[in-house]
Amino acid sequence: MTVVHQLITANELLRMPDDGFRYELVQGALRRMSSAGFRHGRLIMNIAASLDHHVRAQRLGVVCAAETGFLLTTDPDTVRAADVAFIRQERLDPAAEPEGYWPGAPDLVVEVVSLNDLSTEVDAKVTDWLDAGTRMVVVVNPRTRSVTVYRSRAQIVVLREQDTLDGNDVVPGWTLPVAALFA
């Protein structure tokens, strides 16, 4: 017996009725996302609060929460949602703010590894973000209490608790001690 999987579009995903789950779309295939655990949510808030405070104070752009979808590719469509995302002010147009998914990649993405995340899935998300134009992907791993910063597929830095995460040219002036992230 042959099983046929029908691909869906970003517009179809956007219009799906709320069934209590979160979804991403990867090359037209629907992927159901597990709800986050307590530690996962706490770590997201630790980094999002710090990032958002700095971004607002410096008027650098906007920080988006986990439910925000980004349309990374079309035909077939890929819609990803980061745990935290940042878009530079120069890329924003308040008069044309999309009601649906943001068309393209954010400048910064933060992904917190969940208990049930496979390393291959995390790697695939990092690759999707980078290939779509994200300038910095930050992967927070609660199990190893480490942060991996990707600027490209080849430019990768692993930070430990004694190190400091730095927004560099993506989020100028923003820093966060890795130890404070896990506090």
Image (cartoon, helix red, strand yellow):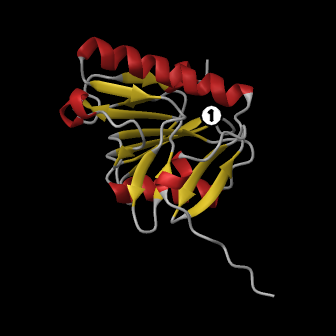
Quadrant position of residue 46? top right
Is 159 placed above or below 103 here? above
Q: Identify the residue at the far bottom of this view.
A: 1
Tell me the residue that label 1 is attached to.
145
Residue type at numbered disc 1: Arg
- The residue under the point 40% across, 19% down is 52
Q: Nearer the viewer, residue 46 or 100?
A: 100
Relative vertical location of residue 14 with respect to residue 175 in this rendering, above or below: below
Q: Position of residue 161 (x, y in %)?
A: 55, 28
Q: Quadrant of the N terminus?
A: bottom right
| Residue 21 visible to the viewer | yes
Residue 148 vs residue 88: left or right?
Answer: right
Crowding near the residue tagged with mark 1, few <14, some 14–19, many ≥20 C-alpha atoms within 10 Å = some
Depth order, front residue of 22/50: 22
What percent of the width, then of the height, locates residue 54?
34, 16
Q: Is residue 157 visible?
A: no
Q: Where is the C terminus found, in terms of image quarters?
A: top right
Instruction: Name the image quarter holding residue 74.
Output: bottom left
Nearer to me, 159 or 82: 82
Total marks in image? 1
Q: Is residue 107 left or right of residue 40?
A: left
Q: Position of residue 43 (x, y in %)?
A: 60, 26
Residue 26 position by quadrant: bottom right
Give the residue displayed 41% in from the left and 68% down from the top: 75
The residue under the point 24% across, 16% down is 58
Please indicate whether residue 180 sits to the left or right of residue 115 in the image.
left
User: Could you say whether the residue bearing mark 1 is in a helix, strand or loop?
Assistant: loop
Farthest residue in the left direction? Answer: 90
Q: Residue at x 51, y 43 (%)?
A: 81
